[in-house]
Image (cartoon, rainbow, N blue to C red):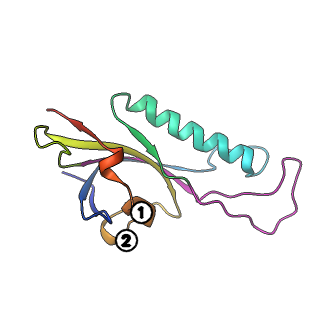
Amino acid sequence: MPLSHILLSSGRSIRLTELRMSSTYGGMLEGYPCKRINDLKVGWLQRGAERAFPSRRVHLVPPSRAYPEETPGAFGPVEVLPPVACVGVFESTALDPAMDGSSLVVVWFQPGPEVPAGEDADLALRGLCWEELAQDYEL
């Protein structure tokens, strides 16, 4: 049973079958959010998804980055990612009718710990080009 359904902008319906959420800056003991730290965090999350799901394609939705009015520190300007980092496994009908289904692992960041669903899902998720990104599978 899927966690949720999302209707993509293309009209394709996808199912969220697994979701991993974490605090974007959880465990950050020193420093402050800046471009260098954020680039590392985004890369770690994407590589972690690739290791966790080696037989599936992984797609990173580029995160929004905010620049609050704060004095730059030793690492440059303050740059903040959305507070929740997500890795989700999505499935849908097959791209090739001879196959059983299609899937895609998506990495994204969002403002809160809500499960994306329906038309309330982030526009970046709803705008996924499933036909270009997903991969068919056989059962």
User: From what the image shows, is residue 28 above or below residue 4?
Assistant: above
Q: What residue is disc 2 on?
A: 120
Residue 42: image location, x then y, percent: 59, 44
Residue 104: image location, x then y, percent: 33, 43
> Pointers 2 and 1 in contact (CB under 8 A)?
yes
Dot 2 lies on which element? helix
User: Is 106 in the magenta?
Assistant: no
Is residue 48 something that shows in the picture? yes
Please, what is the three-letter code of the amino acid marked with disc 2? Asp
Residue 120: image location, x then y, percent: 37, 71
N-terminal of the two: label 2 or label 1? 1
Of 42 and 8, which appears nearest the observer?
8
Residue 54: image location, x then y, percent: 38, 28
Q: How far, Cα to Cα, is label 2 from label 1? A: 10 Å
Q: Which mark is on residue 66?
A: none
Q: What residue is disc 1 on?
A: 114
Look at 39% across and 61% down and name the residue there: 127
Magenta stretch: helix, strand or loop mostly: loop
Q: Quadrant of residue 51?
A: top left
Look at 31% across and 63% down and name the residue there: 8
Please, what is the three-letter code of the amino acid marked with disc 1? Glu
Look at 71% across and 44% down and name the residue there: 37
Magenta-tinted stretch: 63-91
Task: Answer with left or right where residue 44 lies relative to residue 87.
Answer: right
Is residue 18 something that shows in the picture? no
Q: How crowded is the residue under tag 2: few (<14 C-alpha within 10 Å), some, or many (20+)?
A: few
Task: Answer with left or right where residue 99 lies relative to residue 45.
Answer: left
Q: Determine the residue located farthest toward the left in the rendered image.
A: 98
User: From what the image shows, is residue 134 above or below residue 7?
Assistant: above
